[in-house]
């Protein structure tokens, strides 16, 4: 009896602690979104209240959509992120296949060379990256960002995907070879479909730092036509510091796509981080 | 005739020129080398060059001497380096224990709603620094008054101060914002490590009467040390490469009075220039080289000392 009671009390304490931390994690996000739908007076008078019919206002969103080219920033972010992920997945899977499938001289060395970039941040080469982009006239183009993010994402992609490709059965590939499939056909038609779950994990991992990056957009592509959402909201908010409605609405607009994607992909992402420990 | 033909064919098949390997490797290798490795090497090379009397010349370790000792540079540099270490130590002292505690609670078997807690607590990690920085700037702002209001509810209003605006507390405040954002990563990695401990080990411990706290300290903690090692090195690399959050919350000058300046913001100002200060490519490259050496030292220490000493538990 007493044992059952202590374990009940312990479970209660654990839930209390977890609920408390969940509140700490979610409260700032909730506060921002709730207040973005309120009038200026209501934001200051009752910051913690949820918007009511009385205090509801879209004035902040109107300002944001009128003043900043947020739709343009969004397009830039989507183009940069999607193209970079596609290139990372394609090039990364090809290299991972070469490293895991064939024995050739320098295989291990090549693997180590590509793995260097997992630990050494690409930012440290910014001085020369900017010079290179100036020399090739790529400053203020989305291409510059795509190139940098592709290089940034490749090391981890090659590492994760080659681990996965080692688990694809040799019999299957050899059966393909006997049937006269070329090595390219084996890769694209047999192996790629089998490593799709790993590709999804890599895609999510690659996406987050690209979408959220401020450093390279700030340095390589700060022009109005090439601003990403992260840089765009940074500059917009900097200009509208005193317009609280606009600031809160801009923040909510930036949070929204991440929130939607997270709700859809959270299972995939968490399984990826925990290397499948969470079913 | 026929058998000879076959042996020749087999011989050719054994050593064909396997161009496909090159084709598979080339795109990744080309982009990675051209955009990441070569610029990194070039940046390191430029840290040995500077413009002397209008001539771009090799100056050996001259740039480093200036950075460490010249009155125009040294104060800023040592300040940024010290702040960066404080930034890292606060992460290690706050982020990792909270992460471990959350993971330990989440891994209790048959805990209800654990998937919900997990998902919710990880959310801030996905938000960009810009969002996180501004949200906290608003919450901590005395103008809006959310933070003092909340502290009033628990009777601690007297403790409130505009932390981000004071030189003695700004660095701690910014570090804690970063901890708030990133606590999800140690939580997840350690959670996975805890789930990977085989049930037999736990059952054996319980048969021996080792339960609860002592089970965590004596059985589980030693088994998750490798995960804690990985978390620590990830934190180290991330912290010595940080920039975005401080730039968003405190601006490029990393105020107040440089109290939140770390190597990332110093690199940005030096290389790119800010307000009256002109950009300096050579000194920028020098700071990047220092950051490279610090990160390299940390990673090497982890790979060759810590990871080797840690006993590998095989199940």
Image: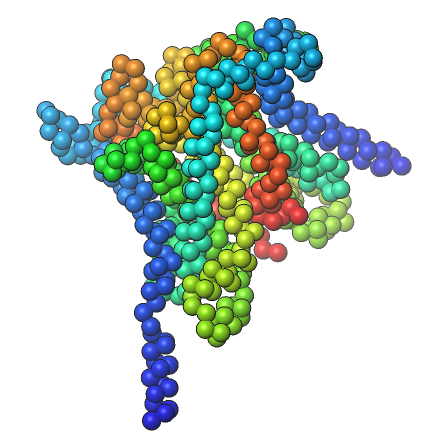
Does residue A204 appear left or right of residue A23 in this picture? left
Residue at (24% x, 28% y) in the render: B281
Q: Quick check: A254 left or right of B158? A: left
Q: Residue furthest bottom?
A: B1
Instruction: Compare residues A135 and A1 and report the one nearer the observer.
Output: A135
Q: Quadrant of the N terminus of chain B?
A: bottom left
Q: Which residue is at the far right?
A: A1
Residue A26 location in percent, x, y?
63, 25
**Where does residue A171 sit, x and y in percent of width and height?**
53, 70
Coloring applied to the structure: rainbow
Image quarter where the C terminus of chain B lies is: bottom right
Q: Is residue B232 visible?
A: no
Snapshot quadrant of residue A149: top left
x, y percent for residue B293? 33, 37
At a point 37% along the width and 51% down the height, the residue shown is B28
- Left or right, residue A253 beside residue B72: right
Quadrant of res B38: top left
Q: Is residue A104 above or below residue B113?
A: below
Give me the residue at 44% from left, 59% from top. A97
Asked whether A89 or B258 is in front, the reply is: A89
- Which residue is depicted at the point 57% across and 45% down? A272
């Amino acid at each position: 009896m007493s044992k059952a009671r202590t374990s009940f009390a312990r479970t209660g304490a654990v839930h209390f602690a977890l609920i408390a931390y969940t509140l700490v994690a979610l409260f700032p996000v909730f506060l921002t979104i709730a207040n973005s739908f309120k009038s200026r007076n209501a934001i200051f008078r009752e910051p913690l209240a949820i918007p009511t019919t009385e205090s509801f206002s879209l004035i902040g969103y109107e300002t944001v959509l009128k003043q900043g080219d947020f739709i343009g920033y969004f397009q830039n972010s989507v183009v940069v992120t999607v193209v970079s992920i596609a290139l990372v997945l394609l090039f990364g899977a090809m290299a991972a296949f070469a490293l895991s499938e064939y024995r050739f001289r320098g295989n291990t060395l090549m693997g180590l060379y590509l793995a260097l970039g997992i630990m050494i941040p690409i930012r440290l080469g910014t001085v020369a990256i900017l010079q290179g982009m100036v020399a090739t006239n790529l400053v203020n183009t989305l291409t510059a960002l795509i190139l940098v993010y592709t290089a940034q994402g490749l090391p981890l992609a090659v590492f994760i995907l080659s681990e996965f490709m080692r688990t694809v059965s040799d019999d299957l590939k050899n059966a393909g070879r006997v049937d006269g499939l070329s090595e390219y056909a084996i890769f694209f038609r047999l192996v790629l479909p089998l490593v799709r779950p790993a590709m999804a994990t890599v895609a999510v991992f690659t996406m987050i730092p690209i979408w959220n990056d401020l450093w390279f957009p700030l340095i390589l592509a700060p022009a109005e036509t090439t601003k990403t959402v992260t840089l765009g909201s940074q500059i917009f908010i900097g200009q509208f510091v005193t317009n609280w409605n606009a600031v809160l609405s801009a923040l909510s607009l930036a949070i929204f796509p991440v929130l939607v994607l997270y709700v859809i992909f959270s299972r995939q992402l968490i399984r990826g981080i925990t290397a499948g420990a969470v079913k | 005739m026929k058998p000879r033909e076959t042996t020749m064919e087999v011989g050719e098949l054994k050593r064909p020129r396997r161009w496909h390997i090159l084709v598979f490797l080339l795109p990744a290798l080309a982009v990675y080398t051209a955009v990441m490795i070569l610029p990194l090497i070039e940046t390191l090379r430029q840290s040995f060059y500077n413009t002397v009397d209008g001539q771009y010349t090799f100056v050996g370790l001259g740039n480093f001497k200036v950075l460490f000792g010249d009155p125009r540079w040294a104060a800023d540099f040592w300040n940024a380096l010290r702040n960066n270490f404080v930034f890292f130590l606060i992460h290690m002292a706050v982020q990792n224990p909270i992460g471990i505690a959350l993971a330990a609670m989440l891994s209790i078997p048959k805990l209800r709603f654990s998937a919900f807690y997990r998902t919710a607590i990880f959310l801030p990690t996905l938000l960009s620094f810009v969002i996180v920085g501004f949200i906290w700037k608003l919450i901590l702002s005395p103008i809006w008054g959310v933070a003092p209001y909340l502290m009033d509810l628990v009777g601690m209003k007297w403790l409130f101060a505009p932390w981000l605006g004071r030189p003695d507390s700004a660095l701690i405040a910014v570090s804690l914002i970063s901890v708030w954002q990133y606590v999800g990563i140690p939580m997840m990695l350690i959670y996975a490590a805890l789930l990977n401990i085989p049930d037999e080990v736990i059952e054996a411990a319980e048969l021996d009467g080792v339960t609860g706290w002592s089970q965590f300290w004596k059985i589980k903690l030693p088994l998750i040390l490798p995960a804690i090692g990985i978390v620590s090195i990830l934190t180290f690399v991330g912290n010595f490469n940080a920039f975005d959050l401080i730039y968003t919350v405190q601006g490029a000058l990393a105020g107040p009075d440089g109290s939140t300046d770390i190597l990332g913001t110093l690199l940005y100002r030096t290389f790119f220039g800010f307000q009256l200060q002109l950009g300096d490519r050579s000194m920028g490259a020098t700071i990047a080289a220092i950051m490279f050496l610090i990160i390299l030292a940390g990673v090497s220490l982890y790979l060759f000392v810590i990871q080797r000493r840690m006993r590998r538990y095989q199940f």
